[in-house]
Amino acid sequence: MKVVLVRRDVKINLNEKHINDWHEQGAHVTHFFNALSVLFPAGERLFMDSVRAYKDQVQDPELKKAITTFIGQEALHSREHEEYNEMMDRSGLPALKLDKMLWNLLGGLQKTLGRKLALGGTIALEHYTAIMANAVLSDKNVLGEKSDESFRQMWQWHAYEETEHKAVAYDVWNTVMPDNVYNRFIRRFGMVLATLIFWPVIMYFHARLVFADPNTKGKHIQGYKAVGRMLLGKEGIFRKAVGEFFDYFKADFHPWEHDNSAFLKEIDAFVEKVNASMRNPNDEVKKAVRARMVKSAVAATAAA
Ligand SMILES: [Fe+2]
Ligand SMILES: [Fe+2]
């Protein structure tokens, strides 16, 4: 499968007043996605570094170009998630504290594990991301049709591009690692390691956000049930994708054997819609953003 990647400078203007309750399923589900957002700046840096570390060993010009665009896409995702995380912090959630914790954890792991296992972990986590991205794009209930439009746009845009570049890190692995028993073991071990790190971290970050939000008080049973349903219920993200997850352990696995490339045809129209919504002067989101910009301009003038 040949996919030509595109770097799109999409600017999502999140509706800050709904940072704690943007998902139609309530605060606990909102904070699950919010916790994922906290993972991205440090996580995507690991992905970029891991792929970049092998760029010189790649000869194929198309793959070289794909690596550059992959890094460009992840950098833009991080830029938007940093803004998202700062909003959480402003609303009293410890997002930046958790983000710092993750930078330390992943930085330490990168040094300890070395570049081969870092790339192994990256392709495993890109598989997780691809599974979640597919869920976001194929099931409207994951983001919720009545959820805040700006957050839906944010996650949908990220999901489209994660789908578009889901095989890049994997193709780098296949290109630079000779196919032998040891490397196959390392690739699978990378998934075991990624799983052992991802779930405790996301659960801990989620709990920290949930318990820092006073509006969740007294709603924990109902809220955690909603999160459980979304992940492991009959129509849950991981229950539906269990086969897809374990396909990773096959010797001849490739991300595009789960062919959801039909979504890629929707990206241009989607981006156009996002840009158009940003151009609408009556849009509530845009008004809020403009108000913030004026406020920070006034503060900057006062400081000068
Ligand atoms: Fe990303
Ligand atoms: Fe990615």
Image: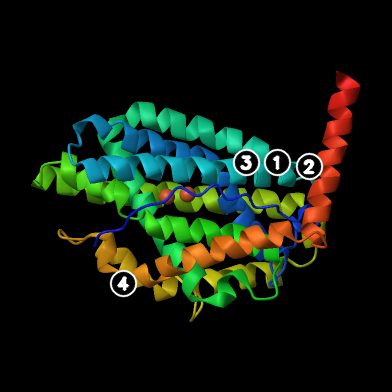
Local packing at callout 2 (Cα closer than 10 Å; few below 14, some 14-19, many 20+) is few
Colour theme? rainbow
Residue at point 19%, 62% (across, down): 250
Q: Is residue 23 left or right of residue 188?
A: right
Q: Is mark 3 within 8 Å of ligand 1?
A: no
- Amino acid type at mark 3: Glu
Dividing the picture into quarters, in which one does residue 108 lie? top left
Q: Is mark 4 within 8 Å of ligand 2?
A: no
Q: 272 or 22: which is nearer to us?
A: 272
- Amino acid type at mark 2: Arg
Tell me, yes or no, whether the two marked residues, 3 and 1, touch with CB atoms within 8 Å.
yes
Q: Distance between the Cα atoms at labels 1 and 4?
A: 36 Å
Picture layout, residue 55 above or below residue 69: above
Q: Distance between the Cα atoms at labels 3 and 4?
A: 33 Å
| Residue topped by disc 1 | 86
Image position, residue 35 (x, y; %): 60, 51
Q: Earlier in the sequence, mark 2 or mark 3?
A: 3
- Amino acid type at mark 1: Glu
- Amino acid type at mark 4: Gly
Tell me, yes or no, whether the two marked residues, 1 and 4, touch with CB atoms within 8 Å.
no
Q: 254 or 68: which is nearer to us?
A: 68
